[in-house]
Amino acid sequence: MSAATHHPNLLHSIGLRRQLVLVTAVVILLALMAIDLTTGPSGMTLNTLWQSLWSGPNGPDRAAAAILWQIRLPQTLTGALVGICLGMAGLMMQTILANPLASPYTLGFSAAAGLGAALVILFGSSLPLALWISVPVAAFIFTLLACSMVYLMARFRSSSTEMLVLSGIVVLFFFQSLQSLLQYLAAPEVLQQIVFWLFGSLTKASWVSVTIIAIILIFSLPWILRDAWNLTSLCLGDLNAASLGLNVAALRRRIFILIALLTAAAVSFTGTIGFIGLMHIGRALVGEDHRFSLPLAGILGAIILVAASIVGKLISTGAVIPIGIVTAIAGIPMLAIVIYKTGNPK
């Protein structure tokens, strides 16, 4: 049999394997979400979970319905949506910067969000808006500001990937230093609020956070999917991508804006959550084709964040450990693996 005959069969087999990986990841995510919904100080059986979900917020078991619909379901959905946003944003940033260690966290976007939130917490009493809405709004604005700073600093010299990475490091240390200054100036009770927000937590998630994050994600998805094949081409290098007719600079601008939107939406309500954007095991499972690796990166990000929520509840049943601490601890060995793989490509 000729190689030409084998070629379509090989492509079909690769396509089926990629679809199987995506379906398996979705099933794992749904299973973890169900476990997360049944985990907590008051506990909940799977049977009670299904009955409360089916009956709605006004089901016969009022206590279970209140716990599920007012507390746990918004937290679990927020965690999944945040994981999707950060996972996809991380993979896109690694692609446009050609750097496996690039992520919204390592390039200062999350630090900027933390500064915005800290400013509102410190001076919130003089603001016309309530604290629960002004904190995420400030975090969102400062994340977009950090994105603009990184891009403008890089473009002032050159829009190369190296300059973008260096600019991101400058922005990271700039916002982290301002965070430290605010923490030094804050009163003890205010400092506690700032530090808790910087840890990253799902405890203040609500249907408002679910709705806003979902709207931004749904708005961004068509633009992301439109450029999925262009991002795959960019993996070949700037020169090869340009030879295929791709406007590399315009692509980087578009993707940078989308990364800022997704990151701002993710961290505005939950606080700083690191390392999710570095989890690019999806490339090893489905390859560089971003039509598959981008959705998988989002699903894997959601899996990691929901799993971290479960671990945080199991470690401390009385007071839930902030999810940002769990992801940071889990991310350290994963980051070491990424660095080792990068230095040893064989």
Image: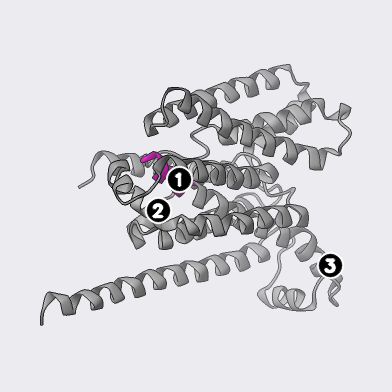
> What residue would you read off at disc 1?
251
Q: Is residue 95 magenta?
A: yes
Q: Nearer the viewer, mark 1 or mark 3?
A: 1
- The magenta stretch spans which residues? 90-98
Going by the numbered disc 2, the residue's amino acid type is Asn
CB contact under 8 Å: marks 2 and 1: yes
Residue 329 visible somewhere in the drawing = yes
CB contact under 8 Å: marks 1 and 3: no
Up-down relation of residue 108 to residue 87 (above or below): above
> What residue would you read off at disc 3?
63
User: What main secondary structure does the magenta stretch of the protein show?
Assistant: helix
Going by the numbered disc 3, the residue's amino acid type is Ala
Residue 165: % across, % down: 43, 31
Residue 248: % across, % down: 40, 43
Give the residue displayed 82% in from the left and 70% down from the top.
57
Q: Nearer the viewer, residue 244 or 27?
A: 244
Q: Residues within 10 Å of mark 1 (few under 14, many from 20)?
A: some
Q: Quadrant of residue 68?
A: bottom right
Can you tell which mark lies on residue 230?
Answer: 2
